[in-house]
Amino acid sequence: MQIHCYYDIPHTGLSWTIPYYFDSIFEMLSSHYVDYEFYKINSAANRKGSEPAKVNGHHHMIIENTANKKYFAISYWDKMKDISTHNGWNQDTLMGLFCSSGMHQEDVYYQPFNKNSIPFSYIVPTHQMFNLINGIKDKNNSLRSMPNKLSFNGDLYLFRDFLSKDNSFNVKRQYLQASDYIQSLHSNCINLSINGAGEICYRDMEILGVGSALFRPKLTNQFHDPLIPDHHYISYDYDEIKNITNQNHFFKAQRDILLDRWIEVKKDRDYIDFVAQNGHDWYKRNVPIKTHTSIAKQVLDFEKLF
C-alpha cells in the first residue's frame, strides 16, 4: 500500500520549523508502519506564491492513501474555515483534520467554527526561537519581576489596537531582535497574549516555553493534551458579553473584564508561579518536535484510510 505525504520538504538554511515538524512525522510513520510504502512529495512544487488556505499550502501536511484517495490533513493554519472545496480540499475523502488553531468564525467574538476536527498540538515558528527558549537555563518564575502593566508586542488590529490606546496596558508594535523579544518575555513573571488571526499563536507557545505565566482570553480551541484554563494558563472569560453587537462597546466591556482579572491575579504571586510551572510542563510535553511527533503517532488512526 502506497501512502503519499505532501508537505514542504526542508532544505538547507531553512529557519521555518513547520517543514521539520512534518518531516519528523513522515519519518515516524515510515518507521512505525513498516507494511506501507511512504513517499514524501514537495507541496511547494505545485504552489503559486504562499496560498496558505489551499490544500498545498505550506501550513498543511496531507497524508493520502493513493488507492482510494482518502487522506488526513495536519494543519497549523489559523483560518480553518478556508478548508473548503473552493481551495482544493476534497471534503468527501478527508478522513481526519488534525489542528488546534483557527477553529473560529471571525476575529472579534471568536465563536467556534462548526467543523469536525481532531485536537492536535501547536508549534514554535523558527529554530532560532527554539534555541533561545532552550538556552534559558533558569526557568524559576519566582525570581522574575512582576510587571506594573500587562505587556504585549505584536501586530496591532481590532482588540489589540484598542488596547494599544489604553494607558492601563503596555500594548505596542515594536520590532525586536528575536533574542531581545525572548528576553522581554523571560524578564516578566506573567505575559499577555491577545487573540489575533487565530486564537492560539506562536506567542502563547513562546511564553509557555520560557516558563512565564501565560495570561490570555479563555480558549475555545482544543488540544490533544488539554491546555486547561487557570491551571496551564491564566484566563479571563468574556462569553457573557458576546451578545454586545457594537464592536467598540464590546471591546470596552472586554477591556474591563481583562483589567478586573489582572487586578485580582497580580495580588497572588504564588498562584502565578504555580500556573507558570504547569504551563511550562505542558510545553515540554507538546511543543518540541520529538514530543509533538509522538502525539501525531497517537492520534493518526490509519484504519480510517482504508
Image (tube, rainbow, N blue to C red):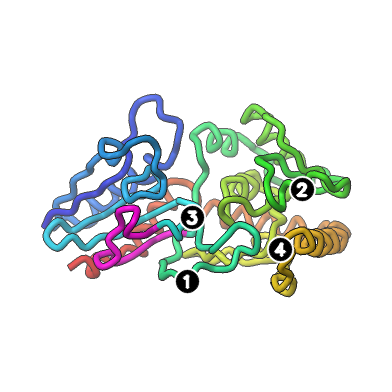
Marks 2 & 3, CB-CB < 8 Å contact: no
Task: Give the label, 1 or 4, closer to the camera.
Answer: 1
Q: Where residue 11 sits in the image (x, y, percent)?
A: 33, 29
In this picture, residue 245 sits left or right of residue 129: right
Q: What amino acid is found at the position of numbered circle 4 in the picture?
A: Ser
Q: Are the residues at dot 3 and dot 1 in contact (C-beta closer than 8 Å)?
A: no
In the image, what residue type sits under mark 2? Cys
Q: Amino acid at mark 3?
A: Lys
* Real-space CA distance between mark 1 and mark 2, rounded to the nearest whole angstrom: 36 Å
Looking at the rendering, the stretch of residues picked out in magenta corresponds to 83-99
Identify residue for label 1: 114
Judge depth for marks 1 and 2 and give the one in front: 1
Query: Identity of the amino acid at label 1?
Result: Asn
Check disc 4 and report its element: helix, strand or loop: strand
Within 10 Å of disc 4 (Cα), the crowding (few <14, some 14-19, many 20+) is many
Q: Is residue 67 left or right of residue 82?
A: left
Of the image marks 4 and 3, the number of the one nearer the N terminus: 3
Locate residue 243: give its quadrant.
bottom right
Quadrant location, the C terminus: bottom left
* Sequence-wise first label, 1 or 4: 1
In this rendering, is residue 155 above or below 112? Answer: above
Kindly identify which numbered label has been placed on residue 79: 3
Disc on res. 189: 2
Determine whether the residue tagged by mark 2 lies in a helix, strand or loop.
loop
Characterize the local packing of mark 3: few (<14), some (14-19) or many (20 or more) Cα atoms within 10 angstroms.
many
Q: Quadrant of residue 229?
A: bottom right
Query: Can you see residue 146?
Result: no
In reply to whether residue 186 is colored magenta, the answer given is no
Q: SS for tag 1?
A: loop
Sequence order check, earlier mark of 1 and 2: 1
